[in-house]
């Protein structure tokens, strides 16, 4: 997932904030990990990486999300992303601040 951040008229802002599967994908593209890959291969290469799970930049270690995946091997990057989607969504829902936190984040103070 990715969301455009609010603009303050400054052109130095990023185009979007990557979180969840989009952030995992961006991290994967920066590695030499090849597929097929085992869960252990992915954990060894990326398990230490902290991945944003929401638009606020809250993050979680990728190894924690891998623990929630039942598959032991991934034939492709897309298969890995598909397997991680459910755990990331569940984690985001369980750890979000709810409606109050979302409303508070929109206020300018």
Image (spheres, rainbow, N blue to C red):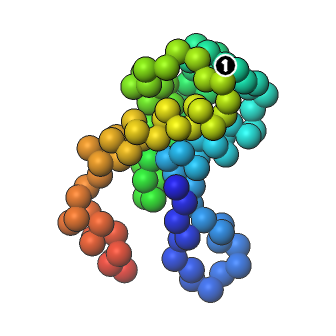
Is residue 93 visible to us here? Answer: yes
Toward the viewer: 25 or 9? 25
Which residue is depicted at the point 65% across and 67% down?
A: 14
Pinpoint residue 53: horizontal percent, then vertical percent: 44, 47
Pinpoint residue 89: horizontal percent, then vertical percent: 38, 45
Q: Quadrant of residue 17?
A: bottom right
Is residue 45 visible to us here? Answer: no
Instruction: Tell how many labels.
Output: 1
Q: Is residue 40 left or right of residue 93?
A: right
Which residue is depicted at the point 39% across and 36% down?
A: 87
Q: Residue furthest right?
A: 32
Q: Quadrant of residue 40?
A: top right
Pinpoint residue 101: horizontal percent, then vertical percent: 26, 63
Residue 8, above or below 104:
below
Q: Is residue 108 left or right of residue 30?
A: left
Residue 40, above or below 33:
above
Q: Quadrant of the C terminus?
A: bottom left
Which residue is depicted at the point 56% across and 24% down?
A: 47
Which residue is depicted at the point 44% across and 37% down?
A: 60
| Residue at the disc numbered 1 | 37
Give the SS element for disc 1: strand
Toward the viewer: 66 or 54? 66
């Amino acid at each position: 997932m990715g969301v455009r951040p609010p603009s303050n008229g400054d052109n130095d802002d990023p185009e979007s904030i990557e979180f969840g599967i989009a952030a995992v994908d961006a991290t994967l593209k920066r590695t030499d990990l090849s597929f097929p890959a085992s869960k252990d291969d992915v954990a060894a290469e990326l398990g230490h990486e902290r991945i944003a799970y929401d638009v606020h930049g809250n993050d979680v270690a990728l190894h924690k999300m891998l623990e929630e995946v039942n598959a032991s091997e991934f034939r492709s990057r897309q298969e890995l992303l598909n397997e991680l989607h459910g755990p990331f969504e569940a984690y985001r829902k369980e750890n979000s601040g709810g409606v109050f936190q979302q409303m508070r984040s929109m206020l300018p103070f």
